[in-house]
Structures are given as C-alpha cells and as structure tokens.
Amino acid sequence: MELILSVMAADRPGIVERIAAVVASHGGSWQESRLATMAGRFAGIVRVSLEQEHYGELQTALQALRDEGLSVQIEVGDSDADAVESHWIEVIGNDRAGIVREVTRALAAEQVNVIDLATEVEPASMSGGLLFRARLELGLTPGQSMDAVIQALEDLSPDLMVDRLDD
C-alpha cells in the first residue's frame, strides 16, 4: 500500500531522520518527498510504500511523534490515479497581490492539474521592484494542448512570461 504523510513541526535538526527511522523500523520504504523550511517551520510530504499488515503499527508510531512536537497526518495513496502527461513551465512577472490566484485560476479554467508548485519573490534588477517567479509541474490529460495552456497564462497580463522547461 502507499501512504502519504504530511508533517509539520518547529524547525530543528533531526526531524527528517526521526521520521525516516520510524518509517524504516516499521517496514516502510521512503519513495519520494518534498521537504522545506519556511519562517522557522518545517513542512513536508512523504510518499511511503508499506505492506498492509504493518499499517496500524506505523500509524501508531507516527502519531506518537506528537510527543516530540511533530504533527503527522496520514492518508492512504491512490495508486490508480488517472495518468497525466507531465510538463514543466516557469512563470515570471512583476509581483503583485493575487498573482498566484490569477495563475492557478487560469490553470483550473483549462482543467490542468498542478502537480508541483514552487514560488519565490526576488528583487527585479532593472526596475527596483519585485519579480514573481514560479516553477510548475502541470498534469495534462491526453488531448489537452500545452500551447493553449501557455496562451491562457500569457493572456493574464502583458508582463507575464511563460517558458516551457521540458522542450
């Protein structure tokens, strides 16, 4: 079976090792993860594969990590999820309130799934303002056009640039 763990805690050394130790000691295999620290908080999602008979013990052990200040949510993964074509893009534009909403609303209107999203704001070298940058992994079903998706994003604002990263 596949499990998705969602982990939150005050950041400190050893969090990842502690989770990995609990997973391994209960027969789980760490398959993939996205881990980050922001504003002094550790946040992560982890996909674990595990034999069904070990699920209860692993669940109990992970919940016991609350005593160490770790909050762990556990969801059973869906290994039969619809297959999608993965495409990577980068979106760059002048930063403004609501830009993530604008981008994700355009993607939702095109029925595009956001698989991975990383955003940052950085100083714009020429204007002295702030530049918004996002890297997105998008999931398109067969028949959806990546060109149409890019056009929908570029139509949001004249300052928004979209680059395809998987060409």
Image (cartoon, rainbow, N blue to C red):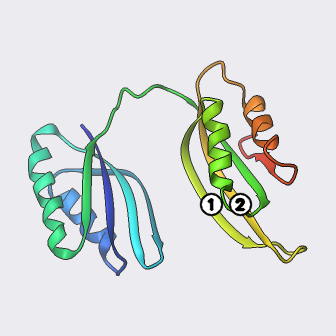
Going 14% across and 73% down the picture, which residue do you hit? 67
Amino acid type of the residue tagged 1 in the rendering = Thr
Percent x, y of residue 29: 28, 50
Percent x, y of residue 48: 30, 48
Q: Say if residue 87 shows up in the picture.
A: no
What is the secondary structure assignment of the residue under circle 2? strand
Marks 2 and 1, Cα distance to the nearest angstrom? 6 Å
Asked whether the beta carbons under mark 2 and mark 1 sit within 8 Å of each other, the answer is yes
User: Crowdedness of circle 2 by 10 Å Cα count: few (<14), some, many (20+)?
Assistant: many
Which residue has dot 1 on it?
Answer: 119
Amino acid type of the residue tagged 2 in the rendering = Arg
Q: Which mark is residue 133?
A: 2
Percent x, y of residue 151: 80, 35
Specify the farthest residue to the right. 126
Q: Say if residue 63 shows up in the picture.
A: yes
What is the secondary structure assignment of the residue under circle 1? strand
Q: How many marks?
A: 2
Q: Which sits earlier in the primary sequence, circle 2 or circle 1?
A: 1
User: Crowdedness of circle 1 by 10 Å Cα count: few (<14), some, many (20+)?
Assistant: few
